[in-house]
Every structure is written in structure tokens, then in C-alpha cells.
Image (spheres, coloured by chain):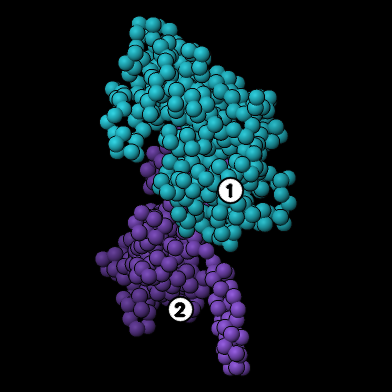
């Protein structure tokens, strides 16, 4: 069995909702991430899918220590991430890096490409001696498929796909072991998406990277992931291998998501039963009791309102958080 | 690729021409490589160069600055030479702007007055922007309680009406009978303008910082482990300085006007200092009999303020990518 590199247990992130001008009082909490557990193995890609507002990006930010967690544990190579300080935290920064969603805001418009990609070396001076930095930066640009001579250009002189490559080069600079990809291709054209996805795949094969790959596009995730976790309202509702999720989905939400994927073959159109969910995603400030999906689920019974379904293997298959989990081929 | 000269058999001329072309293209290439990359600032400069309002205001400001540095370039008359025989004489070929009550040459004094007015404007602007942006960037970047504290503190100063506040400060510092020295009164005027105006710069800086702080590149820098100082100086400041710069340009003009206001009220600069404000103040009682005493210095203040406001407008338009 593969060796785990990143383990997350019961991760919770609540944002307080405050009202009042001078004296703010807390009226509730946005439960962005509520008890998420998973394991990322070495050299593996774990895809995380879910619709907007389900807590995917918050999960990434908490793991990057950009936001403090409310509760829970995350371990990188066995060491507790949230307890790290000083030199240990600096070491962690070298091991876990992030590629952000929007290539238009993730690069400082006042810095040249050389400065942007070289910044990791300025912060972690021990990685590369001063005289060596420009060469390293040019190497990185070459690795991600950019012209190393463009080192003095500014971000606005590049296209969206090229900018995302710059962001990837920056993430690679410190030779990390894990890269958190926070919807890295969702802001790009479909043709550019494929290029960037292929680049990410090649880099993984060459450098043995592990990806936590966050996306809202099921086909994008399938292309790259070994395992997939489906999130709904701050919780993982189903997790399994790529085949488990795409061929044998058990949770009704996963089934509904998959049935919404467009089919490129027109003869197949209308043959399969499309599951249409009704209603909106409930507010994460006041999520439904029991199973969070029950308000939109066609299988919901009384037990769903009273008992939270655990994310445990069901029907002898992979883990799914549903009392009435059953396999159903959708696509 | 083979050399085209050698393929054709290689007459000397052809080879030389080919070499020349080769060299030329090589030179071209290197100049392309060395060409400075286009940054937002150079984009803005390219836009500004073609704007008439920018050119006009820049010329006016250049003349005023030259006047302040080198007033004797414009006049050889001593601004402190009084000839009471000529008191209140209107403009003539001898003295273009006429004489004031004491028989001073108004033209000479207007030239020499530029220095004090401009100095007050520049120092008050520098101080305002320095205090305002320092507090603003701290408030914008810091955690919420410090932000609230600094913002409310700034609100206290912003709540004081400018003229009232300046009267209170300057009359408290100087007893009515006292006649403070030049350096002291200039310092006091600069300080009181800065103390009453910094909240504006602070608010501009704070809101610009709040916007910049949310940008993904700041997240990426934090993810790399960048220190707060590095984030502030490397990522926030370069992206927040533009609106403050625009404010500073406009404020400089406004502060020259403020200097004149305070001098007119008799609490700012005062004789023996020569400034436009002092000249306007001296003309107070003789406006009907000798309007030239008021009109010329007031004209200088108006034109200078206008030039800085126009400059600020032009710079803002050039730095705002949305207006392009």
C-alpha cells in the first residue's frame, strides 16, 4: 500500500458571522469545512470536487496555513502542520506549495516574471545561492514551457495560460513534495486547460509530486486523479478511487453530479436518466440537521434528519456518507 | 542553416552584404533584448506625454519651481527694499505689478514669495502622505482591532474642520503679541496642515491596502512563507502607491492655498516672511483703492493650485487602467 504523505483528520473551519458597527457580536458561524478527513499518498493525486461554496478552497487555505483551523489535525509526513512554528514552519513552506485559481490576480502586476518566480529563493535563501538564482529561474521557466528570455517581462504581457505556467513555476521553485492545486484550470479556455493539465501530469511523473487537486469540473478531475473526494456543504460525502466514483457512485449527490456531465455522443442523449436536483444549496451558516444533503435528496427518510451518516465503507465498497448508499451506474 | 553568401559562390561584395545584413539583424536583436520592459509606470508615462493638460500643468509647475529656487532669475529688485514715496502706486512700466502700502515692488515680492509658499506646500504634503500612508497601510494590513483603533483615531482628526483646527493650533502655539521666527512659524504651519490632513491620505492608503491584501498574489507570498515586512514592501506598497501619489499632487496645490488662507487670517506665515499668503493678507484693507495688491498674488496662488490639480487629474487617468 502507498505511503501517506498528508493525513487530515476531522478538519473544521468555521468563520464567525459578526454584526454591529462598534461592538461586533457573533450571530453565527459559516461552517465552511466541517469535519473533513482524508489521506494523500506519496506520488498520488487526490481530486476534490464539489460545487461553489462547498468549502474546497477553504480546505486548501487551511492546509496551506493561510487560515487557522477551528479544529482538527493535519499531518505532513507524520508531523502536525497546525502546531508548527518558526524554522519548522519554514521547512513546511518548502514542502507544500499552492497553485491558485485565477492567473490574473495570483501574480503581482508590479513584479517581473523573474522576480515572481525568484521570490521563493529570496525568502528561502538557503535553497539557492544568490549568483545561481537567475539560472534557476530560467530553468524553471523552461520546465513549464516558457521562454527563459522573458524573465524581464511583466505578467500583463502574458496570456492566461502562460500566467498559470508562471504560477506553477513559482510553486515548483522550492522543490515541494505536495502541491495544492486550487482550481488551477477553471479560469482558462478549454484548449489551454488541456495543456496545463498535461504539464501538471508530466511534472508529477518527473518529480514524484503529490497533488491535492481541487476543481468543480468532474472531467478535469478524472483526467488527473487516482482518487476522488466529493464535497458537499463542508463535508466529504464520498471518497474512493477514480473508478469507484465514476463507475460505481453510491452517494446520491455524486450520482446527481455525474448525471449532469454532458455526453459528447448525440445518440446517447436522452437515453440515460438525468437526475435533476431541486432547490438551492442550503446556507452553510445554518446547515440541515443530520445529513446535509437530505433537503435535496430523493431518497431522504426520517433517519436522514436525525442521524448524521458516517463516511464509512458501504455495501462492501468504498466510503460514502449516506444511509441508503447503493451503486448506480450513471454514465 | 548555411550562409547565403557561400551558397551563391561567394563574390566578395555579396559576402560583405550578407555579413552586413547578418550584423544588422544581430544588432537589432540585442537592442530588442535590452529594451526596457513595459511596466505600468512606463505605460502611464507614454499616455501622459501626449496629454495637453499634463504638459501645460507641468510647464506651469516648472516655472513656479524655478521661481522658488532662483527668484533673482526673474527680478533684480530687492523684495525688502521699501520706498514709501511709491506707496500703493498702480502697475506701470517701472514696476509691472505696482507697489504695495510699504512701497515694496509687488512683482519682486511675488517672485520671491514663491519659495515660502511652495516649501510649505511640499513639506506639508510630504508629512501628510508619510503619516497618512504609514498609518493607513498598518491599519489596512493589521488585524481588525488595531484597524478599528487607528481608523477611529483618524476619524477624530478628520472631524475637526480645517480652518477652525488650524486657528486653535496656531493661536495656542503663539501668543497674539508674539512674533515667532521664520523657521518656527513655517514649521508650525506645516505641522498643523499635516496634523489636520493626514486622515485623508490614511483612508486612501487603507482602502487601497484592503483591496491589495485580498489579492491572490499576497496569498501566494504568504504560502511561500514571506514575512509581513516583505509582503508590505514588496507586494502591497507598489500596488497601493498610485492613488496616494494622485492625492499628493492635488493636495500640494490645496496646501499652497491653505498657506494663503492661514496667512490671510494672520495666524500663518507673517512678515518679515515673503509669501503669496502674506501678500494677500497685507492687501486686506486696501483692496478697493489698490486692487493690484490682491489680484497678482491671488492670481499666482490660483494658477499654481490649478496646475497641481490638473497634474493630479492627468496622473490619475494615466494610472487607472480602467480609464484607458
Q: Quadrant of residue A98?
A: top right
Residue at point 57%, 30% (across, down): A63
Quadrant of residue A288 within the rendered picture: top left
Specify the chain shown as cyan: A
In this rendering, would A4 be left or right of A250?
Answer: right
Q: Position of residue B264 (x, y in %)?
A: 38, 57
Which residue is pictured at 47% across the width and 17% down the height?
A: A320
Q: Nearer the viewer, residue B16 or A270?
A: A270
Work out how far the residue at label 2 is from the one at label 1, CA to CA, in angstroms. 63 Å
- Evaluate if marks 2 and 1 touch, with contact meaning CB atoms under 8 Å apart: no
Question: Does residue B145 appear left or right of residue B91 in this picture?
Answer: right
Q: Chain of mark 1?
A: A
What is the crowding at mark 1: few (fewer than 14 residues within 10 Å), some, or many (at least 20)? Answer: many
**Disc 2 secondary structure class:** loop
Which disc is residue A169 wearing?
Answer: 1
Q: Position of residue B64 (x, y in %)?
A: 44, 69
Per the image, the residue denoted by label 2 is B75
Question: From the viewer's perspective, is the residue at label 2 or at label 1 nearer?
Answer: 1
Amino acid at each position: 500500500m502507498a505511503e501517506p504523505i498528508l493525513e487530515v483528520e476531522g478538519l473544521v473551519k468555521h468563520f464567525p458571522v459578526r454584526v454591529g458597527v462598534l461592538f461586533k457580536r457573533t450571530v453565527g458561524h459559516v461552517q465552511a469545512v466541517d469535519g473533513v478527513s482524508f489521506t494523500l499518498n506519496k506520488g498520488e493525486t487526490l481530486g476534490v470536487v464539489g460545487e461553489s461554496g462547498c468549502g474546497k478552497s477553504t480546505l486548501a487555505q487551511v492546509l496551506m496555513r493561510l487560515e487557522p483551523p477551528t479544529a482538527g489535525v493535519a499531518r505532513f509526513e507524520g508531523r502536525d502542520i497546525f502546531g508548527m512554528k518558526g524554522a519548522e514552519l519554514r521547512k513546511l513552506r518548502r514542502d507544500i506549495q499552492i497553485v491558485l485559481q485565477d492567473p490574473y490576480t495570483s501574480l503581482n502586476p508590479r513584479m517581473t516574471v523573474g522576480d515572481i518566480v525568484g521570490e521563493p529563493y529570496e525568502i528561502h535563501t538557503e535553497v539557492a545561492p544568490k549568483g545561481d538564482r537567475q539560472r534557476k529561474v530560467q530553468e524553471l521557466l523552461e520546465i513549464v514551457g516558457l521562454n527563459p528570455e522573458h524573465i524581464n517581462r511583466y505578467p500583463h504581457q502574458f496570456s492566461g495560460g502562460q500566467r498559470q505556467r508562471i504560477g506553477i513555476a513559482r510553486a515548483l521553485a522550492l522543490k515541494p513534495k505536495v502541491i495544492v492545486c486550487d482550481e488551477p484550470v477553471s479560469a482558462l479556455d478549454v484548449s489551454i486547460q488541456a495543456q496545463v493539465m498535461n504539464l501538471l501530469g508530466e511534472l508529477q511523473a518527473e518529480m514524484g509530486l503529490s497533488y491535492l487537486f481541487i476543481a468543480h469540473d468532474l472531467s478535469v478531475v478524472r483526467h488527473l486523479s487516482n482518487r476522488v473526494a466529493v464535497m458537499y456543504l463542508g463535508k466529504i460525502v464520498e471518497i474512493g478511487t477514480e473508478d469507484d466514483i465514476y463507475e460505481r457512485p453510491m452517494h446520491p449527490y455524486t450520482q446527481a453530479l455525474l448525471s449532469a456531465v454532458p455526453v459528447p455522443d448525440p445518440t446517447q442523449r436522452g437515453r440515460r436518466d438525468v437526475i435533476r436536483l431541486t432547490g438551492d444549496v442550503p446556507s452553510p451558516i445554518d446547515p440541515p440537521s443530520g445529513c446535509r444533503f437530505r433537503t435535496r435528496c430523493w431518497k431522504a427518510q426520517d433517519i436522514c434528519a436525525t442521524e448524521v451518516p458516517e463516511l464509512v465503507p458501504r455495501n462492501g465498497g468504498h466510503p460514502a456518507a449516506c444511509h441508503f448508499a447503493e451503486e448506480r451506474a450513471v454514465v | 542553416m548555411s550562409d547565403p553568401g557561400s551558397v551563391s559562390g561567394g563574390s566578395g561584395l555579396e559576402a560583405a552584404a550578407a555579413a552586413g545584413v547578418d550584423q544588422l539583424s544581430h544588432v537589432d536583436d540585442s537592442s530588442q533584448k535590452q529594451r526596457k520592459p513595459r511596466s505600468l509606470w512606463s505605460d502611464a508615462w507614454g499616455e501622459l506625454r501626449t496629454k495637453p493638460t499634463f504638459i501645460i500643468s507641468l510647464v506651469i509647475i516648472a516655472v513656479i519651481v524655478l521661481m522658488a529656487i532662483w527668484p533673482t532669475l526673474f527680478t533684480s529688485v530687492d523684495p525688502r527694499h521699501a520706498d514709501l514715496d511709491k506707496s500703493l502706486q498702480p502697475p506701470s512700466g517701472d514696476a509691472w505689478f505696482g507697489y504695495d502700502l510699504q512701497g515694496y515692488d509687488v512683482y519682486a515680492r511675488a517672485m520671491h514669495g514663491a519659495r515660502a509658499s511652495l516649501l510649505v506646500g511640499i513639506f506639508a504634503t510630504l508629512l501628510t502622505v508619510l503619516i497618512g500612508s504609514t498609518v493607513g497601510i498598518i491599519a489596512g494590513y493589521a488585524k481588525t482591532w488595531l484597524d478599528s483603533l487607528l481608523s477611529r483615531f483618524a476619524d477624530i482628526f478628520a472631524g475637526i474642520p480645517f480652518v477652525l483646527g488650524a486657528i486653535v493650533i496656531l493661536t495656542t502655539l503663539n501668543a497674539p503679541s508674539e512674533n515667532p521666527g521664520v523657521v518656527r512659524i513655517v514649521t508650525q504651519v506645516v505641522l498643523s496642515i499635516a496634523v489636520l490632513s493626514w486622515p485623508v491620505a490614511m483612508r486612501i492608503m487603507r482602502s487601497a491596502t484592503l483591496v491589495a491584501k485580498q489579492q491572490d498574489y499576497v496569498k501566494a507570498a504568504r504560502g511561500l512563507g514571506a514575512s509581513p515586512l516583505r509582503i508590505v514592501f514588496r507586494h502591497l506598497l507598489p500596488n497601493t502607491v498610485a492613488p496616494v501619489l494622485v492625492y499628493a499632487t492635488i493636495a500640494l496645490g490645496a496646501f499652497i492655498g491653505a498657506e494663503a488662507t492661514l496667512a490671510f487670517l494672520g495666524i500663518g506665515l507673517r512678515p518679515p516672511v515673503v509669501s503669496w499668503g502674506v501678500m494677500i493678507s497685507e492687501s486686506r484693507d486696501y483692496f478697493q483703492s489698490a486692487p493690484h495688491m490682491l489680484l497678482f498674488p491671488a492670481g499666482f496662488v490660483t494658477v499654481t493650485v490649478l496646475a497641481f490639480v490638473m497634474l493630479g487629474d492627468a496622473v490619475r487617468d494615466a494610472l487607472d487602467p480602467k480609464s484607458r
